[in-house]
Image (cartoon, rainbow, N blue to C red):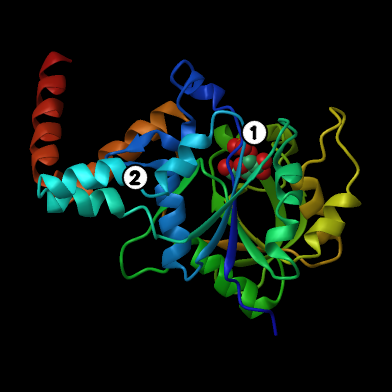
Amino acid sequence: MAKKVTKAVIPAAGFGTRFLPVTKSVCKEMLPIVDKPTIQYIVEEAVAAGIKDILIVTGKNKKILEDYFDSAPELESLLEQDKKEDLLRLCRSTEGMANIHYVRQSHATGFADAIMLAKTFTGDDPFAILLGDDIIYTPNDVRPGIGQLVDCFEETGNPTVAVMEVPDADIPKYANIKGESIGKNRYAIEKIVEKPAVKDKFSNRAVIGRYVVDSDIYDVIRSTPPSRSGEVYFTDALGLLAKQNRLVGCVFEGKRYDAGNKQEYLEANIEYALRSKELGDSMRSYILNLSKTLEEKK
Ligand code: G1P
């Protein structure tokens, strides 16, 4: 039986160039969706899935992440003095969410290399990987995205990746899989390729940034040949697992947003605002009025 998954790794060393110029000085993980930074949604997803030990792989310009999940004594005592209990609670809410650890990736050497830095943290334990650009919304009665993968990993004993159907136009954005159905929402993956052209796709099933792997992933990455650019692709390492019939795809339930893309980032803001207790009603009437105005102007 597979070991329980209690650890997660969040690679967060990227430059966020798709959001320049703001990412010159604010890291992309701190861009808010309504009132919380995107990284908080990722941490909350892991915590809701029962994962309490989290390693964030940071890089240049990312100290702000450590501050965010830490205490803020000066601000807290000011709020305490002013008896602003609600604000104080909000301020403290990010502090003990999880046991968050950090390691720094000194060079922009990619996803697989970021994972290699997690070895001391994970030891021999299996672990989840959550990419910060993928935000997965699940209603309260549905297991969080990464939780669904953990279940699949624990059931099948095999490394698991999140899978989503995409239209042809989006094929070149994601890793793409060839696989056979092995029951509801599960595929045995035979082949996986990073961002193919539409003509080279295996299927319309794309891999989204959620993974659960064993600690042997480190050896697998080490034995993966580098791509032409010299970078070892994490997807190629997964390809070696697929060759050994050890990779499973899990079609997850929930709505996924690409928060690294301006259009979907804005859509996420609108939809999370509509779901919010505080803003839901007023946003709804604002949007209805706006769409009426837009219709009239057509
Ligand atoms: C990464 C992975 C890719 C995966 C995607 C999911 O790409 O390399 O295999 O499909 O995340 O969002 P990126 O979007 O970082 O270029």
Quadrant into which the N terminus falls: bottom right
* 230 horizontally vs 283: left or right: right
- The residue at 53%/34% (across/down) is 62
Q: What residue do we see at 39% from left, 60% from top? A: 96
Categorize mark 2 by other alpha carbons within 10 Å: few (<14), some (14-19), many (20+). few
Q: In the image, 131: left or right of 71? A: right
What amino acid type is highlighted by mark number 2? Answer: Ala
Mark 1: which secondary structure? helix
Q: CA distance from mark 2 to mark 1?
A: 43 Å
Which residue is more in the foreground, 193 or 231? 231
Give the percent coordinates (x, y) of residue 271: 27, 43
**Ligand 1: image quarter:** top right
Q: Determine the residue positioned at 56% across, 35% down.
A: 170
The answer to whether residue 146 is above or below residue 172 is below
Q: Position of residue 218 (x, y in %)?
A: 81, 57
Residue tagged 1 = 172
Q: State the SS at label 2.
A: loop
Q: Which residue is mark 2?
A: 72
Residue 174 visible in the snapshot: no
Residue 35, picture quadrant: top left
Q: Quadrant of the C terminus?
A: top left
Disc with the residue nearer the chain's start (2 vs 1): 2
Question: What's the residue at 10%, 18% (across, down)?
Answer: 296
